[in-house]
Amino acid sequence: MYRVGQVVVGHVTGIQNYGAFVSIDKDTTGLIHISELSDNYVKDITQYVQVGDYLYLKVLDVDQKQGQLKLSLKAIYQRPMRRFRSKIKDQQLPKSNLGFQTLAKQLPSWIKQWKEENND
């Protein structure tokens, strides 16, 4: 049957203010909750899906007894964060001598540094 993480094709059969109902096959239906349509705020579900649409969806949960799936559209289009996080993790932050000094206290040294760099 279906398993969590699997990508399926579903046919949108109905829309409510809380999500969209989808038919996967003759025995299996699912719901795309409004929070699983997009990472952005969704005011109107019909801006994302329409009755009759065929969509690629990711299975989030499976209820074998009822033959129902919890589905996600946004999980299909989300960029994996692991690769992005690892790149950030490896980057070194620039060294700074500012510490916690106030701007007013630091300003004279910035002016002096600027003058030295610009031969003023």
Image (spheres, helix red, strand yellow):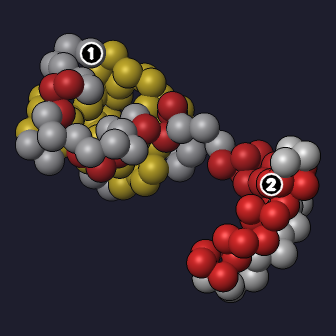
Q: Residue at coordinates 80% horizontally, 54% vertically from top-left?
A: 114
Left or right: where 108 falls relative to 120: left
Residue 3 percent coordinates (x, y): 54, 46
**Image coords of residue 50 (percent x, y):** 18, 20
Spatial CA distance of label 2 from label 1 is 60 Å
Q: Residue at x 90, y 55 (%)?
A: 116
Q: Residues within 10 Å of mark 2 (few under 14, many from 20)?
A: few
Compared across the picture, whether 88 is left or right of 60 comes to right
Q: What's the residue type where badge 1 is placed?
A: Asp
Q: Quadrant of residue 44?
A: top left
Q: Is residue 17 above or below residue 7?
A: below
Point out the residue furthest to the front here. Answer: 120
Residue ID for mark 2: 114
Comparing 94 with 109, the one in front is 109
Q: Measured from the top left, where is residue 101 in percent x and y? A: 68, 85
Q: Which residue is mark 1?
A: 53
Label 2 SS: helix
Q: Is residue 90 above or below residue 54?
A: below
Is label 2 or label 1 in front? 2
Label whose residue precedes the other's in the sequence (2 or 1): 1
Disc 2 to disc 1: CB gap under 8 Å: no
Q: Residue at the location (76% across, 76% down)?
A: 98
